[in-house]
Amino acid sequence: MTESDRLAEGFEQNRTRLRAVAYRMLGSFAEADDAVQEAWLRATRSDAGAVDNLGAWLTTIVARVCLNVLRSRRTRGEEPLDAHVPDLVIGRIDAADPEEEALMADSVGLALLVVLETLTPAERLAFVLHDMFDLPFDEIAPMVGRSPATARQLASRARRRVRGAEAPDPDLGRQRQVVDAFYAAARCGDFDALVELLHPDVVMRADGGTARPEASVVVHGAADVARQALRFHQPAAVARPALVNGAAGIVFTVDGRPIAVVAVTVSDDRIVGIDALADPDRLLALDLSVLDR
């Protein structure tokens, strides 16, 4: 086997992991795929012959590419808006397809992704690589131009911020019951029932994109979120239960066309977060065929 063949084989073996790293770093599948492709180009221009751990080496390359993307966003003033919802991973509630199960395993909760987007690029890299992918701080430090001790501090600061991200209840069946009850209340216009299902400090984030700026809002508090849910409800829409980033959610369609994907975070039988993607361009890019398998 030639050196180029070894590199190509190793890259394909690590592609899923590399894309997962890039997705957690960037919150965008399109940018994640671009980062993985850029990492491949950089790898082919490097001497991989002396590399003992190809997976770790490739992870480092992808991480550096992603760090550059994050820093470039800040330089261009492209910080995510408050209403921005990261790209979503959609799956069936009864996922049984191995490929689909692997995709869901690589997903990460929306609440966590939203918090990650508030971190500095260096904090995000240190947290993602160490806490999610077990890279030692000795390897992370050169990427951010800091000492291992400082890299550890970056991850620690990020960890304190991330602790504020509510984790969904582990019982998916119970999540589903709460989400179904919320949708039923919205469909019936039952304001009091909606409020009862919401945590007092619930946050609703709706991202309509540039095509629908009027649909981009961030709403705090049970009463205001309930009012917004009633305002956004469309009687003609078909609600399809789905897994959204590993938690109970809903895909709304009209005449078979997706108009919104809603991710719901349920904690202690109350909804603590609602993230709705209503950007027509990004909805078209989602693979919803998994719901029909």
Image (cartoon, rainbow, N blue to C red):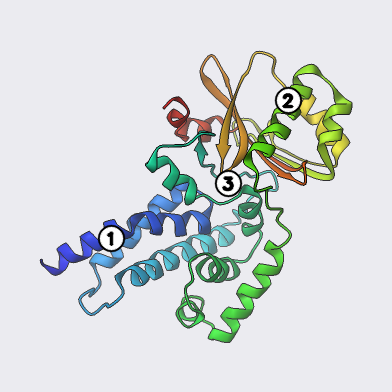
Specify which label sits upstream in the sequence, 3 or 2.
3
Residue 82 shows in the view: yes
Q: Is residue 289 left or right of residue 269?
A: left
> Which quadrant of the rendered structure holds the N terminus?
bottom left
Disc 3 is placed on an element classified as loop
Task: Tell me if residue 166 comes above or below residue 57 in the rendering.
Answer: above
**Label 3 Cα neighbours within 10 Å, binned few <14 / some 14-19 / many ≥20:** many
Specify which label sits upstream in the sequence, 1 or 3.
1
Picture quarter containing residue 220?
top right
Disc 1 is placed on an element classified as helix
Query: Residue 141: where, in percent of width, then height?
Result: 50, 80
Q: Nearest the camera: 284 or 160?
A: 160
> Which quadrant of the rendered structure holds the C terminus?
top left
Residue at label 2? 232
Q: Amino acid at mark 1?
A: Phe
**Label 2 Cα neighbours within 10 Å, binned few <14 / some 14-19 / many ≥20:** few
Residue at label 3? 86
Q: Amino acid at mark 3?
A: Pro
**Label 1 Cα neighbours within 10 Å, binned few <14 / some 14-19 / many ≥20:** many
Label disc, if present, on residue 11 of the rendered structure? 1
Query: Residue 173: where, in percent of width, then height?
Result: 64, 37
Residue 261 shows in the view: no
Label disc, if present, on residue 290 of the rendered structure? none
How far apart are the alpha carbons under marks 3 and 2? Answer: 20 Å
Query: Residue 228: where, in percent of width, then height?
Result: 79, 30
Q: Mark 1 near mark 3, Cβ–Cβ under 8 Å?
A: no
